[in-house]
Amino acid sequence: MAEIVIKGLRKEFGSFTAVQSSTFTVKDGEFFMLLGPSGCGKTTTLRMIAGLELPTSGEIWIDGEEVAQKPASQRDIAFVFQMFALYPHLNVRRNISYPLVSQGMPKALVKEKVAEVAKILGIEGILDRPVGGLSGGDRQRVALGRAIVRRPKAFMMDEPLGALDAEFREHMAEELRALHDRMRATTVYVTHDQLEAMQMGDKIVVMNHGVVEQFGTPQQVYDHPATMFVANFIGSPAMNFLPFQGHMARGASEVTLGDTRIETPQLQETAPGPDLVLGVRPEHVWLDDASTYRGRILATEYLGTSQIVTLSAPNGQIKARIPSARNVRTGDTIGLTFTASTLALFDKASGRALRTSVNAEVHNG
C-alpha cells in the first residue's frame, strides 16, 4: 500500500475549471473520503489520481513516485465504480480472476488468490454463479473482489454503494469499512453522502466548486467547520446561522444577539468586517425559560429518541435537537441558551470561520 500526495492539482475542461489547486495527503493505510455535492470536482480528482484523467497542472505522488502524466496502467491502482462494471458473460469466479489471468499468473496461484478473496468477502458459495442473477450487494462484492485480488498500491472507489437501497447501503458501508480495517489498504472514496463519509472515513476532504473547503478528521470537520459551506453541508439538520453586526477584535469572547450578550470562544484574530455570523449545531441549542434570548416554536418533528424543534428567534430561524420526552408546543415562546465552547464565528462576506480558542489548532488543509 502507499501514501498519496496531491500538490496544486488543477483540471480545466476548456473554459471550465473542474478542480482548482487542490492540495492534500492520503496517508498509507487511510480510508480517505472525497465529499461534496454533485459537480464539486470530487470524481474528477479521483480520476486524476487513478490516471483516467490527466491534470492540467499539479503533482500526484503515489508511493514516492510522481505519476501525474503517467497512464493508469503504470500506477498500480484498482478502481471500483458505482455501476459494478462486471463482465456479464463470465461467472463470479472468472470475473474476480480476470486481472490475474490477464497478467499470465499460474492457474494454481490464481485459484488460491480467488479463494482467499472469496473468503474475505463471504462469497465462497456463489463463485460459479453467473453475475447477471446476483443481487446488487453480491455484485458489489464481486466488483470489490476483482479490485482487491491483485493487491494494488491503492484503491479508488467512486460512490460504490450509490446503486444500493438505503438499508443495504448502510450494511455494505459497515462491511466495506471492516474489509479496509482487515487489509489496511490505502483507499480514496468519493461520496456525496455526508453520513457515509462520517461513518467510514479516517480523513475527509470537503469540496465545493472545485475547491478544497476543508481537510481533517470527521470530528474536526463536524466540530470546527472551516467555512459556512462545510457547516451547512455536514450535519443533519445543518448548523444554525445567526447573523449579527459588530466589530470583533482579537481577544473578544462575547457577542450581542438582540438584547442578549452571548459568551463565545475567545477570538484569535480580528474580524475583517462588521457583518458576522454565529454558528451553533442543533444539539447545542438548549431550551431555558430563564434566558432573555427567546424564540417562538414554529414546528416540532418527532424522531424517536429525540425531536427537532424549529423556532423563530430575533436573528433568524433556529433548529434545536432535544429529548423526545421534553414537552413543547407549537406557538410557545421559550428562552434559548448556548454553550460557548460549541459555538463557531464566521465572516459573512467570505464565509470563512474566524479562528477561536477552540479551533485554532485545527488543520484545514
Image: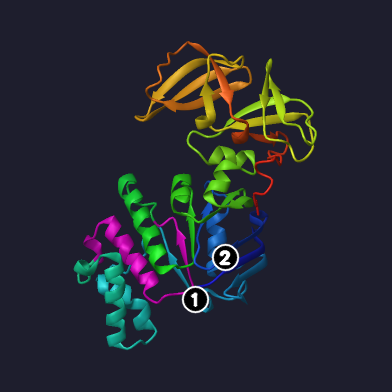
Q: Is residue 6 visible?
A: yes
Q: Is residue 133 left or right of residue 20?
A: left
Q: Is residue 52 visible?
A: no
Q: Is residue 299 left or right of residue 149?
A: right
Residue lying at 58% horizontally and 52% vertically, measured from the top left: 216
Q: Is residue 90 left or right of residue 33?
A: left
Count all numbered tags in the image, as a single digit.
2
Judge whether 86 appears above or below 303 on screen: below
- Residue 175's x, y, as percent? 34, 57
Q: Quadrant of residue 91?
A: bottom left
Judge whether 44 appears above or below 228 on screen: below
Secondary structure, mark 1, is loop
Residues 264 and 229: in front is 264
Q: Is residue 122 left or right of residue 179?
A: left
> How many residues crowd around disc 1 within 10 Å: few (fewer than 14), some, or many (20 or more)?
some
Which of the two discs, 1 and 2, labels the residue nearer the N terminus? 2
Secondary structure, mark 2, is helix
- Residue 32's x, y, as percent? 51, 59
Residue lying at 48% horizontally and 11% vertically, measured from the top left: 332
Judge whether 226 appears above or below 302 on screen: below
The residue at the far front in this view is 290
Q: Magenta segment, which residues?
A: 131-160
Q: Which mark identifies residue 48? A: 2
Residues 165 and 364: in front is 364
- Residue 235's x, y, as percent? 50, 39
Q: Which residue is mark 1?
A: 76
Residues 58 and 245: in front is 245
